[in-house]
Image (cartoon, grey):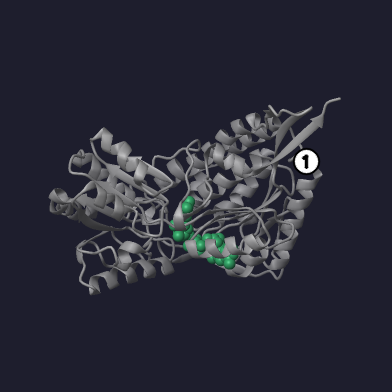
Amino acid sequence: MSNAAYYGKVFIGGEWQEATGGKRRDVTNPANGKVIGSVASATTADVDRAAQAARAAFDSGAWSGLPGRERSRVLLNVSKLIRERADDLAQAESADVGKPIMFAKNIDVTTAADQFEYFAAQAQVLDGSVRNAPLPAHAYTRREPIGVVAAITPFNFPLILSSSKFAPGLAAGNTFVHKPASETSLSALIMADILTDAGVPRGVFNVVTGSGAELGDHLVTHPLVDKIAFTGSTEVGSHVAELAAKALKPVTAELGGNAANIVFADADLDKAIGTVINAFVFNTGQFCMGGPRLLVERPLYETVLGILGNAVGGVPLGDPSEPGTVIGPLASKSQLDKVAGMVDRAKAAGARIVAGGKKLDINGGYFYPPTVIADVDDAAEVVKDEVFGPVLTVQPFDTEEEAIARANGTRYGLAAGLQTSDIGRVHRVAAKLDAGIVWVNGWALLDPSVPFGGVKNSGWGRESGEEALLSYTRTKSVVVAIG
Ligand code: NAP
């Protein structure tokens, strides 16, 4: 179906429908501030209908009751259709979020397809086990789907972060109600079309677009919803977890990040600089697992600042629909204002702006240049809080212990990285970093087989890997008396 046919609608029980009340929200292209379409503003009545459809589909067994191998075939179809519709998806993601088209296609779309391919294989091997219990009985476990999952996703990686929930959740036999971020919902609608064409039965997958503030509590506490898979800010995630806890619903919460990237004096400097830049500009810095806090061993501090000051202005920035663009706009005006406000306050407090530091006036878009900030301490807002823009703070350190303590010194713990040529240090430091994933001599190396997720205020649970699959299952023990 063409995108235009379902933009502005909700997808419930296998059908595209007007939202109750018929209200819509404009979708703006952040590269030029122009309205490019609209999405439905769903109501709590739509959430009710979506939850009922997902419940009925789950209880019917049309999906949950299929052998894993049959679900696997459908998920492989999903992966194939995502690749076939790569241009469609990439263009929607680029126009909606401001992602450079080359990344939207080669990273976002590809990762989404890879997720379905990986979990299609997992669906075939998901199994319980026989327990060697000293009982007059045969004891075994079953891995069963949990039921109806409410998937709530953020604005920055709509396609990847929804696929990293749907692929393991569907592989395990669950059904879904998806509430994408209201700023960036378009790819969620295309995915509903793809899942349907791939053979996912009616009602197994439902999408309600609309405001999290208006729909979120209702969805999370809905009596027909069994599990919450949330990705977003620490503040909203904590609220969601609190609501879910009252109803004793399991929650996976992938929340904010503010990773440190530690460059030791023995690192391969050329390679490290490339990694540092990539880690803070990728997705215009709207990357929960980005590396916005650079810690540099003191002898290299001014050298690194000098290189970064010269280099970052050369990273191609501009129209995300151009194939050579590396940095697009921020995803919304509110995100632009938030980032600019944090940098302005750092400047006012005496920080040194080594590069960038001022909004760019390009074509009415929400552009901010790669910005490097020096001479800030750990208590500065721009160091301790999540900026979520193309902003790098650079701080010197003197010892390995200090670097570890400073890297661990925020409330977040999603990712961390170190650049060094000392193999002993690699293992020593990686073990002590308080983070769900540690990258060494690189950044953002991700795969559907490699779990990621947070510690501390970066959340609970893991996405990707066997860990993700198991989080969409519950264990039942069956003990059969013998004789
Ligand atoms: P957000 O404001 O927390 O929103 C995330 C989602 O929650 C959106 O769909 C939002 O809807 C919805 N929501 C808002 N209020 C809600 C409520 N009361 N109940 C339930 N849902 C509600 O986050 P964001 O600004 O979109 O995304 C950026 C944040 O996500 C950053 O902190 C980033 O680090 C984090 N993130 C984490 C990961 C990870 O893997 N750990 C990955 C990506 C992003 P609306 O859009 O309608 O407000």
Question: Does mark 1 have its CB less than 8 Å from ligand 1?
Answer: no
Q: Is residue 447 above or below residue 57?
A: above
Q: Is residue 22 above or below residue 185?
A: below
Instruction: Locate residue 62 relative to residue 5 in the image: left or right.
Output: right
Please rate how many residues cluster around mark 1, counting C-alpha atoms within 10 Å: few if below 14, some from 14 to 19, many from 20.
some
Instruction: Spot the residue most to the top.
Output: 483
Q: Is residue 179 above or below residue 107?
A: below
Residue closer to the observer: 41 or 65: 65
Seen at 20% across and 49% down, the residue is: 399
Question: Is any part of residue 156 visible from this angle?
Answer: no
Q: Which residue is mark 1?
A: 62
Seen at 59% across and 49% down, the residue is: 190
Image quadrant of residue 396?
A: bottom left
Residue closer to the observer: 268 or 182: 268
- Which quadrant is the C terminus positioned in? top right
Seen at 32% across and 37% down, the residue is: 427
Residue 41 position within the rendered picture, expressed as x and y whole percent measured from the top left? 63, 67
Question: Secondary structure under badge 1?
Answer: loop
Residue 5 position within the rendered picture, expressed as x and y whole percent measured from the top left? 64, 54
